[in-house]
Image: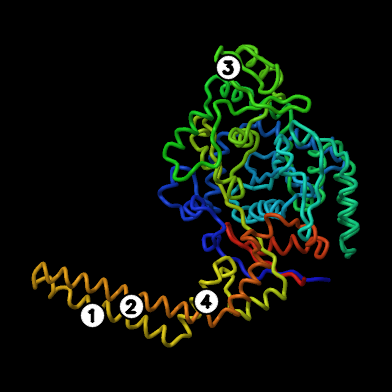
Amino acid sequence: MAKIRTLETISLEQTPLVSPLLKSYLKQDKNVSSLFEKPVGLDQILAQARVKKQQYSTGQRNLLCEEIQNTYQNTLGYSAFSKAQEANIALLKSQNTFTITTGHQLNLLGGPMYFVCKILEVIKISELANQNQEGFTFVPVFWLASEDHDFLEINHFYVQDKKYSWNQSFSGPVGRLPLDGLDKIFSDFLDQSPKTDFFEDLKQKITTSYLSSRNLSEATFKWVNALFSSYGILVIEPDNPRLKQTMVPYFQKEIVENFTYKNTQKTLENFPVKPQVNPREINLFYLGKNLRERIVKLQDGRFQVLNTDLFFSLHELLREIETAPEKFSPNVLLRPLYQELVLPNVMYVGGGGEIAYWLELKKVFESQETAFPILKLRNSLQLITQKQNKKRQALELDFVDLFLDPRNKIQEKVENESELFKKLSFASENLQGWFDELEKETKSAGEQFYKMYLAQRKKQTKGLEKLRQRMLKVESKKHLEFQERISALLEEIYPNQKLQERSESFLLSYLHYGDAFFSAYLSSIKDLGSRLIFLETEN
């Protein structure tokens, strides 16, 4: 059997893969301290559980458990749960059990590789948190983004740079999208896939999820379940009338008070960077058949569903929310509140873009007296073949070097190996030392003489530095072949400065390694740090 193993993990802070905002968040800088409640850590998870326990009622918990069971039974049949899921749903009924959550759009077959990595991470964090119990238990949850409407973001997947696309004409929530035409796409993919030991297993999972479902939400539900049910993951379908009942007073307040807009704007007044998402005055969509459109307030006081002839008075709209909350869908800034009211959640694991917009929302949660969860920037993954790793070792590249400009490595090589460059650097240091010694005496010699001293220091320093840089350029030319080898390897591993996980599917890795791919990723996570994980593959 082919082997896959952990090579290395490095902190994401060491790489150029995270934004300045996220670097500040990871370092817990003062300029972002007001944007979150608790830092990431096992002790903080326990503290958050104590807070959430005070807020999350028995009624909320019973409703959640009932709807999870109903969804699984309606989707998968009578024997819906794996043993691990049965154990977790039983735990979830206890007032001392809380969730570790991630979520994602309904990308075909998961889309980019990080889809499965996010799920695996909440599974592992729950396991780590359960080793540190103090009377609490934690279960992993995946929240389906079934009400999203950006079809072009989810209608494809890549395997070995080949794009498999699903072309459909549809509007409305993508979860309700019928699956016409998918059979041909999957047939094409399977025909071109290597017939490994795991081929039939993958084919069966695709068939029993996407090719036996009524819509994309059901298919994605089954797909996640087929891959991860044995790990105990619980999938939440938010496009649910009973769960939406929870949001009736909040949807109504959103219409009347615009609390999401007002509180997010307060945060953005002092936000350290350009915001990921700007709030709207009303952060709600109206749902209908093939319809998910924004609700806006008109100058005459009425409300309109954009691009339709649907109009409401304030009374009519509030009444519609009360009697049919399933017709309303929160946007990206209101959806987190929905999630945290439905779930006994203590931590959300998300990518850089997700964490960036969550950091806008603390005041929104405070205004609704709802606990703001711990925010965990997800790990990232890079696969490296054995051949690529041997090249890396031969070039004496550290793992962090794989994401830096090759010229940096050349300069480092010159600095370490060129005797002339070393002498010039030594001369530069000595020159500064010599000028430092003269500083005090030249000051006492009078202002005019001191100005001459400063001018000469500047001239000599600049001249020597120019000579040093010229020497660096000359010496670097001797290493062009070395630089080209580095550039070629970086283009293999990090093409266009884009991690493999952000486009390439996990499917080929699953075909070669099966569940061993998941096990290798899980075993590489030792703590709650945000890391870049390197896994070595045979090919």
Distance (Cα) linking label 3 and label 4: 62 Å
Residue occupied by mark 2? 464
Asked if labels 1 and 3 touch by Cβ distance under 8 angstroms, the answer is: no
Quadrant including the N terminus: bottom right
Distance (Cα) linking label 3 and label 1: 74 Å
Please give left or right for residue 457 compared with residue 127 in the image. left
* Residue depth check, mark 4 versus mark 2: number of the one nearer the observer: 2
Distance (Cα) linking label 1 and label 4: 30 Å
* Residue depth check, mark 1 versus mark 2: number of the one nearer the observer: 2
Point out the tag, 3 or 1, that comes first from the N-terminus. Answer: 3
Specify the amino acid type for callout 3. Answer: Leu
Q: Looking at the rendered structure, which numbered label has been put on residue 410?
A: 4
Q: Looking at the rendered structure, which numbered label has been put on residue 434?
A: 1
Distance (Cα) linking label 1 and label 2: 14 Å
Image point (29%, 74%), residue name: 461
Image point (54%, 39%), residue name: 372
Asked if labels 2 and 4 touch by Cβ distance under 8 angstroms, the answer is: no
* Residue 85 percent location from the top left of the image: 77, 47
Specify the amino acid type for callout 2. Answer: Leu
Displayed quadrant of residue 260: top right
